[in-house]
């Protein structure tokens, strides 16, 4: 049996199936983005209402709102461009580590733990700098189409 004949015979069917498959994937990603975006907004509003009940917002609470903001911005950028910028993930990690330092009394933490967290923040900042430099130097290929 000649495999070339079967490929030629089912070529149009395969192309049509791939097109439908890509449309289904895009629909799933779009629905997931709306669900994720709605969940982020809902969680941020819930956290904000909790701060309003306390009548004040601590540094830890404010940093939590920044985390929600960064997550929302990341979803928005992915919605517009079809790409997740790695820098936003690193910014979120930096904010989480900073929140960890701010939410726990530093006196209760061991010196080694403080040193490890601060070193991790420094390494993440260096990673953002390297990513920024490589993007400036080598550029990013922009895509006109959304996802597929």
Image: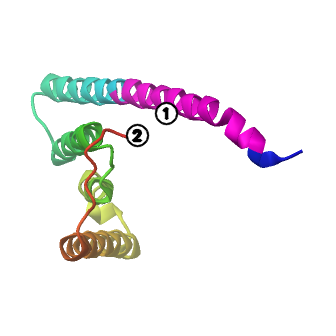
Label 1 environment density (alpha carbons within 10 Å; few <14, some 14–19, many ≥20): some
| Part of the protein shown in magenta | 5-33
In the image: residue 117, left or right of residue 125: right
Counting residues from the start of the chain, the first of labels 1 and 2 encountered is 1
Quarter holding residue 81: top left
As helix, strand or loop, the secondary structure at mark 2 comes to: loop
Q: Where is residue 3 in the image (x, y as percent from the top left)?
A: 80, 47
> Does 99 appear above or below 138?
above
Residue placed farthest to the left in the image?
A: 55
For image coordinates 13% across by 25% down, the residue present is 52
For image coordinates 33% across by 49% down, the residue present is 84
As helix, strand or loop, the secondary structure at mark 1 comes to: helix
In space, the residues marked 1 and 2 are separated at their CA atoms by 7 Å
* Quadrant including the C terminus: top left
Residue behind mark 1: 22
* Quadrant including the N terminus: top right
> Does 45 appear above or below 129?
above
Residue 38 is inside the magenta segment: no
Please identify the dominant SS of the magenta region.
helix
Q: Where is residue 101 in the image (x, y as percent from the top left)?
A: 28, 59
Quarter holding residue 93: bottom left
Q: Are marks 1 and 2 in contact (CB under 8 Å)?
A: yes
The count of marks equals: 2
Residue 148 is marked as: 2
Q: Position of residue 126 (x, y in %)?
A: 27, 76
């Amino acid at each position: 049996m000649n495999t070339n004949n079967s490929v030629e015979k089912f070529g149009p069917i395969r192309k049509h199936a791939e097109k439908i498959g890509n449309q289904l994937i895009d629909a799933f990603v779009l629905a997931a983005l709306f669900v994720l975006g709605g969940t982020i907004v809902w969680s941020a509003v819930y956290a904000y209402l909790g701060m309003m009940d306390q009548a004040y917002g601590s540094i830890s609470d404010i940093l939590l709102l920044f985390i929600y903001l960064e997550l929302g911005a990341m979803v928005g950028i992915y919605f517009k461009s079809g790409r997740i910028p790695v820098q936003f993930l690193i910014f979120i990690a930096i904010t989480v580590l900073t929140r960890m330092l701010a939410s726990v009394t530093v006196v209760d933490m061991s010196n080694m733990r403080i040193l490890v967290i601060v070193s991790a923040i420094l390494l993440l900042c260096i990673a953002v700098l390297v990513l920024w430099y490589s993007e400036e130097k080598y550029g990013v290929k922009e895509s006109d189409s959304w996802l597929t």
